[in-house]
Amino acid sequence: MSEQAFGCVGAMIRLRSGRYLDLIDPDPAAIVVEDIAGPLARICRFGAQLPGNQWYSVAEHSVHCWRQAHKRWKAGFPGEHPRFHLAVLLHDAAEAFIGDCVRPLKNLLSDYRAVESRIEAAIETRFEVSFADPRIKQIDNAMLIAERRELFQDDGVVWHGEDAVPRLIVDFKRWGPAMAEREFVYCLKLAGVKE
C-alpha cells in the first residue's frame, strides 16, 4: 500500500482481543480462538440475504460441517490426518478477519482470494492443520446445498453442482451469536484446542 487510507493502520485490522493482524503478512501467533469464534458467530451466511428474519451464522455452518465430518469419517477413515476434523471446523476461519464474501463475488475478486489464501495459511500454521484435503470442500459444498434447501424456499432454480453432492440431513438451529460462539468453542475443545 503506497498511500495510507483514512482510518487504517497499513493493511492491519484490529481484532476483538486487541491484537492487530496484517492482511498482507498475517502472523500465525496473532491468531487466537477468541478472534475467530466471536466474529464467525456474528457473520450471517449468504450475505445475510436469508428470507424473513432468519439468522444463520458462519460459526453454526462450521459446527454442522464438523459434525458431518465427525459422523461420517470418524470411524477409521483410511489415511485420515489426526487434525482433519479440526481443519473442517476451521475451514472458514479466515472469514473472521475478512468477512463472508458471497461465492459469486468471491469468484470475481482475485485480490480477495489472495488475501484469503494468506490468512488461511497463517491459520493452518497456527493450528497445525491443512485445508488442502478435498474432503473438506466436499463437506462444505454438501452443507451449502443442505442450507439452500432448508433456509430458502424452492424457487425452481438449480444451483450449480446441487445434484453432485450427497443429501445431508441436518438439524439447523439458527443459533443466535452467543450460542453459536459457545458451540464453536466447544467443538474446538473437543478437537483438542486448549485456548
Image (cartoon, grey):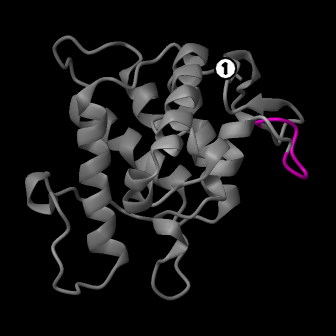
Q: Is residue 126 above or below residue 165?
A: above
Q: Residue 20, how many percent across, how many down?
A: 83, 32
Q: Kindly indicate the quadrant of the structure image that contains residue 75.
A: top left
> Is 44 in front, or is 85?
44
Q: Residue 64, how many percent across, how many down?
A: 40, 49
**Magenta: predominant secondary structure element?**
loop
> Is 103 in front, or is 190?
103
Q: Quadrant of the C terminus?
A: top right
Callout 1: SS: loop
Q: Is residue 124 above or below residue 91?
A: above
Give left or right: position of 62 versus 19. Answer: left
User: How many marks can you see?
Assistant: 1
Residue 8 drawn in magenta = yes
In the rendered structure, which amino acid carries the disc numbered 1? Lys
- The residue identified by callout 1 is 194
Q: Kindly indicate the quadrant of the structure image that contains residue 73.
A: top left
Q: Which residue is drawn at 19% across and 20% down?
A: 77
Give left or right: position of 2 versus 55. Answer: right
Segment tinted magenta in the rendering: 5-11
Q: Residue 21, how many percent across, how many down?
A: 76, 31
Q: Which residue is drawn at 37% across and 13% down?
A: 82
Instruction: Examine the rendering and report whether any part of residue 14 can be seen.
Output: no
Q: Which residue is drawn at 47% across and 78% down?
A: 50
Residue 109 drawn in magenta = no
Instruction: Examine the rendering and report whether any part of residue 13 can be seen.
Output: yes
Q: Residues within 10 Å of mark 1 (few under 14, many from 20)?
A: few
